[in-house]
Amino acid sequence: MACIRRATIDDVFTIQQNNLYCLPENYQIKYYYYHSMTWPQLLDIATDSNDSNKSVGYVLGKIEDDSNPLHGHITSIAVLRTHRGFGLAKKLLTQNHHGMQSIYNAPYCSLHVRISNYTAKNLYQKALNYKVDSIETKYYADKEDAYFMKLYFQGSQVKVS
């Protein structure tokens, strides 16, 4: 099926290709390089079990250290359609969450998801226990609203408001 590992700078191009193929929100290649150099422990990749050179998914996380408290944030996650439905997105996110907690001592993780993306919202809420914190109007380039969601990690000393 797939193997999950920490991505390296050599994986950045294939991660960008997955992003372009799967999502309407795309980034320039320098953005991926910036993430991989700034938060290397928060860039994870899923590769095909039969071909370790074939990327089938990724998660791009970062630390928001300009807020108090600092916290993790999922910038982007994607899994190729051929590999969806096997729990791969959950595994990618779980590994990324672990890095946020163990390396950066982040008390929680946030993310944005399109209001219309029921499948992703269901994954975040039901499989990972994210909660909707607010709605950000016209968040996306096409003016669609986004749910701003948070997951407080177990053992976190941050009070949930």
Image: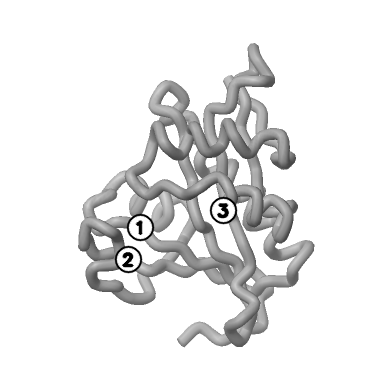
Observer-nearest of 102 and 51: 51
Q: Nearer the viewer, mark 2 or mark 3?
A: 3
In terms of secondary structure, where does tag 2 sit? strand
Question: Which numbered disc covers residue 31?
Answer: 3
* Residue hosting label 1: 113
* Residue hosting label 2: 147
Q: CA distance from mark 2 to mark 1?
A: 5 Å
Residue type at the position of mark 3: Tyr
Specify which label sits upstream in the sequence, 2 or 3. 3
Q: Is residue 126 shown above or below 67?
A: above
User: Marks 2 and 1: CB-CB under 8 Å?
Assistant: yes
Q: Nearer the viewer, mark 3 or mark 1?
A: 3
Specify which label sits upstream in the sequence, 3 or 1. 3
Q: Is residue 15 shown above or below 114?
A: above
Observer-nearest of 141 and 87: 141
Q: Quadrant of the N terminus?
A: top right
In terms of secondary structure, where does tag 1 sit? strand
Q: CA distance from mark 3 to mark 1?
A: 20 Å
Residue type at the position of mark 1: Val
Residue type at the position of mark 2: Tyr
Q: Residues within 10 Å of mark 2 (few under 14, many from 20)?
A: many
